[in-house]
Amino acid sequence: MRLLKVELKRILKTRLTLILLSAALLLSFVMAWLPITFSYISYTDTAGNTVELKGLQSIAYEKQLQADTAGTVTPEKVRQALEDYQACLSKYGVENSYDLPDGVYGAEILPYAPLLHGIREAFANPDTGIAPGLMEIHPERLDDYYNVCAERIVSLMKQEQKNHPAAQQIGVDLYSQVKKPYLFFPGYSTDAMDYQFLLAFLVMLFCATIAAPVFTSDYQTGADDIFRCTKYGKAKFAMIKIAAAFLICGAAYCLCAAIYILVSNSLWGWECTKTSMQMMYSILNLPDMDIGQLQGFVAVSGLLSLLAVTSLTVFLSSRFRNIAACLSTALLFCILPVILYMALPEAIGIWIYSILPAGAVSLQTSILYAATDFNFWNIGPVAIWLPHVMLGAYVVEIPLFTGLAVYSYSKYTVK
């Protein structure tokens, strides 16, 4: 324990570590606030003047405007929203809301617009997947709204996983567990979720930078020659150094994630966390989660991914004698999922980037997007939903790379 405290103090007293940890804490507040600044709404007041609202004022106005939509999303509410929408467009003689006169959408449709979310997707053609226009759907069909969604997920999975019946069945089973009717509370934006894993990505880069010199710095300075002559200078010393890196990186991530969620939800409103994720993303999303649970899922997944990256970084540190080379390689692995996503065909890339340690928080390949998609690993008759693949990979990689780091350091030969 004494050696662990010494190692923790050694890492934390490093100037670069202090700078990176301070930057991570500052970013937690800044990135929780940034999505708020994207909120914008304009309307015409009774005097005919255009009023523009931004930030918290925009969110407050939107909540007030859509107050009647808050709560349970019943088929009756959805049907009424569609009837009002069709009546509005018919009144102005247009087929699309984009053709409405200025100010009409905000005044007459925006108050119930969230309830229109997903209607077209639910009634998409089961063979082609082409969604009809809202004017083409008869309101009476919405009396059976959630049964229509249940039927649509069957045809959707057949389209997404055409030659994989096991994946089709898993998708249908997952969706059957989603609580219905959905819940919706106005005011929230998916930008807040995007910034949560963007913060996790930046913290991961910082932690890789902190962990890279764990062994390499001692190799480079020659201090390792002395440590190896001591009683616990090999395997035990390696485990102490790795544990210190894990504690610092894990604690930093948990603190940043907690600050982000607390600040973000306080700004958007805690009632928004009860909104079903299906009302924010696809109406047919497979996870049975509300926004609050999705935030927790992203946070835990990000922690596992960060620990996997940290374990890989300390393994690289045990192999490299040069800090710059070790850090460059570690950072390359942090951005590798994005590179593979852009460079490889999806059918190939998905098999690789989903098991890379940094995959869960790497922008386009994040586990948030995987949770809102319908991708599977299909191995013969076996199908595994992609988020489960990613989480399973991190659970394996953390002890694997940690063990390899201890073994590599213990067997390291000074040249």
Image: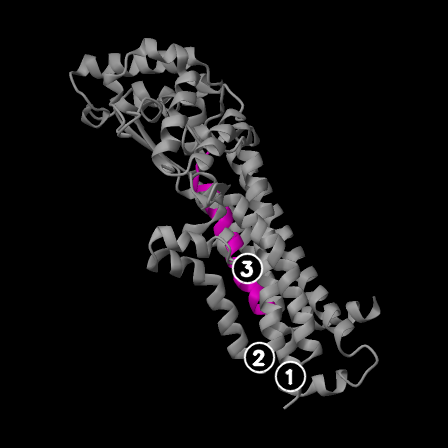
Q: Amino acid at mark 1?
A: Tyr
Q: Position of residue 309 (x, y in %)?
A: 57, 61
Give the labeled residue for mark 3. Answer: 204
Q: Amino acid at mark 2?
A: Phe
Would you call the spot at circle 1 few (<14 residues within 10 Å), some (14-19), or many (20 or more)?
many
Would you call the spot at circle 2 few (<14 residues within 10 Å), some (14-19), or many (20 or more)?
many
Q: Position of residue 196 (x, y in %)?
A: 51, 47
> Magenta segment, which residues?
188-212
> What is the spatial separation of the Cα atoms under label 2 and label 3, in whole angstroms?
20 Å
Is residue 344 or residue 181 the one in the foreground?
A: 344
Return the disc, 2 or 3, that comes first in the chain's sequence. Answer: 3
Give the labeled residue for mark 2. Answer: 320
Q: Quadrant of the N terminus?
A: bottom right
* Residue ID at (67%, 81%): 412
Q: Is residue 50 visible?
A: yes
113 is higher (above) or lower (below) than 16: above
Give the labeled residue for mark 1. Answer: 219
16 is higher (above) or lower (below) than 286: below
| SS at circle 1 | helix
108 is higher (above) or lower (below) than 372: above
Q: Nearer the viewer, mark 1 or mark 3?
A: 1
